[in-house]
Amino acid sequence: MSKTVLEQAYSRKLTGLLAALSAAVLLAACDSTPPAVTYGASAPTGAKLNLPVPNPGVLDTAKWPNSCDLLTDAEVGAILPQASNITHKPAKVSFYTAPGVSPNGKLTYTAPPADVPAGECNLWFHLPEKWDGQNSNIDIVMRAIADPASITAFYQKERTADRTATDLGPVGGATTCYLTTLNAMHCAYGHYYFELSGRSTPVDGSTTGNPIWREKVLSQVIHTLTYKMS
């Protein structure tokens, strides 16, 4: 009888110990803080565009690149080493076909709008956070591909029209950029005028206009884009 009592006491002790350990593991899991987001640097791996841009003139929209090819998974990983579950979502953009831009920056439209099936690309991915799922994005929009003089004139026209924008000057290899009140960066470089935006819940939280994503991430994306545009 005494042996049975000892065995029962040991069993109860063991059960209690296991329950305590399980509770401690569960508590640790609930209280665990995800690692801070780390930042890398631009490391272009894709091919350069080398598009047949007329001079003077605007490139036929049928020859425009797929914007989702401008930033590969590997290139995202170089800038954000913890990025995972990366997806590229192309979007159609409509443009007017124009032979050039007048000295005052006005486009001279000569044809109906032409569609670029993947003129825009929205990249979504996951960065460390308590919850799973895609929580960060980078959006790339190609706005014009033309001879450098036309790009400069068009950029200046767009900048002048946006009275609330902030000039950023050269960023990430781009000749010049400005920031809209919607936190989109408009940049000109050589034959290209493009727009870049995005945000990250782990980095920005509920705030808007946080400069960290722009300074740590988007500027490095511009490095990658201008490399391919050179």
Image: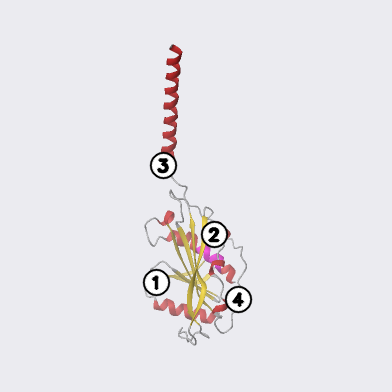
Main secondary structure type of the part rendered in magenta: helix
Total marks in image = 4
Judging depth in this view, the residue of 216 and 45 nearest the camera is 45
Look at mark 4 in the image and give the residue it sits on: 51
Quick one: label 4, few (<14), some, or many (20+) residues within 10 Å?
Answer: few
* Front tag of 4 and 3: 3
Check disc 3 and report its element: helix, strand or loop: helix
Is there a contact, CB below 8 Å, between mark 3 and mark 2? no
Identify the amino acid type marked 2: Val
Q: Which residues are magenta?
A: 219-225
Look at mark 3 in the image and give the residue it sits on: 30
Quick one: label 1, few (<14), some, or many (20+) residues within 10 Å?
Answer: some
Residue 221 painted magenta? yes
Q: Earlier in the sequence, mark 2 or mark 4?
A: 4
What residue appears at the point 45 percent right and 51 percent down from the top-left corner? 132
On the picture, is 99 further left or further right than 179?
A: right
Is there a contact, CB below 8 Å, between mark 2 and mark 4? no
